[in-house]
Amino acid sequence: LIVVDLMHELELGIWKALLLHLIRILYAHGQNAVHEFNARFRQVSAFGRSTIRKFPYNVADLSKLAARDYEDILQCCIPCFEGLLPSPHNETILDLLYILNYWHSLAKLRMHTDTTLQIFRQTTTLMGDALRYFANETCKHFQTFETDKEYQARNRATTRRLAKASAPNAAVVSQVTPEKAATVPQPRSGKRQKFFNVATPKMHFFPDYAEQIELAGTTDNLSTKLVSYNNRTNFNNATPQIIGMDVREAVHDRMTHELEMLNSENSQTMAPEINVIEPTELDKAYHMARDEKNKIYLPDLLEQNETDLAYRKFLPRLKTYFLSMKYGNAIPGEDPKFSDSELSQVIIKDNFIFSHAMKRPRAASCERTTILLT
C-alpha cells in the first residue's frame, strides 16, 4: 500500500508550485507589488519557539526554504497577498489560499471522525475546483515569465551542460572552474514564459487523502516528515548543524534524566508535606498553613465569577477586611467604612491570594477545631 505524503505532495509540491506562480504574477503586475509582498512578510512576528518562525528578508526569492518554511508561509500568506492584485483576481486568489489553508489544516488533524472526513472530502472538491479555475481563468490574464532566480538557475544548468558536452571526459568535467566555464558559449535566450500546470501526479493524489486516513490513520503517522526530521537546517554546511542538534538533544535528555532522578530522591527523603499545620498557639484566633503552593490570580477569579452575587464588590470588601483587622475595629455582621484613599493603600502583592485545604480556629472553650475547606 503506497500511502500519501503530505510534506512532499503539498508543502513541497502543489503549494510550492502555486506560491512560485503567484510570485510570477506579482512580478508581471509590477515590481512594487513584489516589494510590498516582502515588506508585509517582514512585519509578521514570530509565534512560539518554533510554530511560526521569523520570515526571511526576501520571501519572494524562495531561497534556502525547508518544508516547515513553506508551511509557515501558507499559514500567514492571506493578509500578505490581500490587495496586491486588482479585482476580481484578488478575491479569486484569496479564496484559493483560504481553501488551501482549510484543506491543509484538515489534512494535518491528529484525530478524525466521520464528520470531519466528510468535510475533508467536500473541501477537497472545492480545492480542485478553485485550482482549476485559477489555472484556466485567472492565469490567462497575466503574462508570466521566469523569476530572476529561475532564469539564473537555468543559465547555470545550461552552462554546465555545454561544458560537459565540450569536455573530453568526465574527469575534466569535474575540474571545470568558473574561469573555464566563462569561456564556454553562454545561452542567449531571455526569460521563458511560464504557466501554472495542474496536470501533475501530485495534483491527482489529493482525492486519496480522505480514503487513506480512513484506512491507515491520520497523516502525522504517514508523513515522511519524521524521516526528514534531521534536515532541520538551512542547507548551508548542513553536517555541523545536524551534529549540533544531535548533541543538544542528547544534553537535554541527560539533564531531564538527572532532574527526574533528583526529584525521586527528594520525594523519598522529604519531611512531611508543608501543608501539615503545627499546633495552634493559644493566643491566636486561628491558624492556617503558610505555603504558597495553590495560587489564585485575583483578576482571573473576578472575571470567572463576574455574574456571581457573592463576588460583587469582592476586592473592596477584601481590602476593608484587611484594614479592619489591622486597626482592630472589626465588628461581626458589620462592614467598617473606609475611604477610597484608605483602600487604595492596601496593595495585594502580585494580585495573588492562596487557597488552603485546612483551617484551625480556636473556639471560646479553647478547644481546637479542624475545618476542612472545599
Image (cartoon, rainbow, N blue to C red):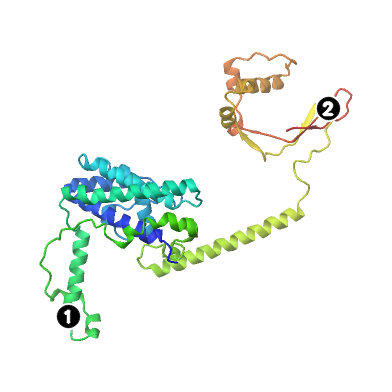
Q: Where 34 falls versus 238 (above or below)?
A: above
Residue under the image location 70 percent in, 22 percent down: 326
Tally of marks: 2
Residue under the image location 66 percent in, 38 percent down: 294
Q: Where 49 falls versus 225 (above or below)?
A: above
Quarter-of-image position of residue 238: bottom left
What label sits on residue 270 in the rendered view?
A: none
Q: Position of residue 292 (x, y in %)?
A: 67, 39
Quarter-of-image position of residue 78: top left
Q: Secondary structure at mark 1?
A: helix
Residue under the image location 22 percent in, 43 percent down: 89
Q: Position of residue 39 (x, y in %)?
A: 27, 46
Q: List the residue tagged with mark 1.
A: 165
Instruction: Name the amino acid type tagged 2.
Output: Arg
Instruction: Name the amino acid type tagged 1.
Output: Ala
Quarter-of-image position of residue 317: top right
Residue under the image location 48 percent in, 55 percent down: 214
Q: Position of residue 202 (x, y in %)?
A: 33, 60
Which of the two labelled residues, at mark 2 and mark 1, occupies the earlier sequence position? Answer: 1
Q: Which one is in front, 324 or 157? A: 157
Q: Is residue 299 left or right of residue 360?
A: left
Q: List the residue tagged with mark 2.
A: 362
Q: Which one is in front, 7 or 260? A: 7
Q: Which one is in front, 99 or 194? A: 99
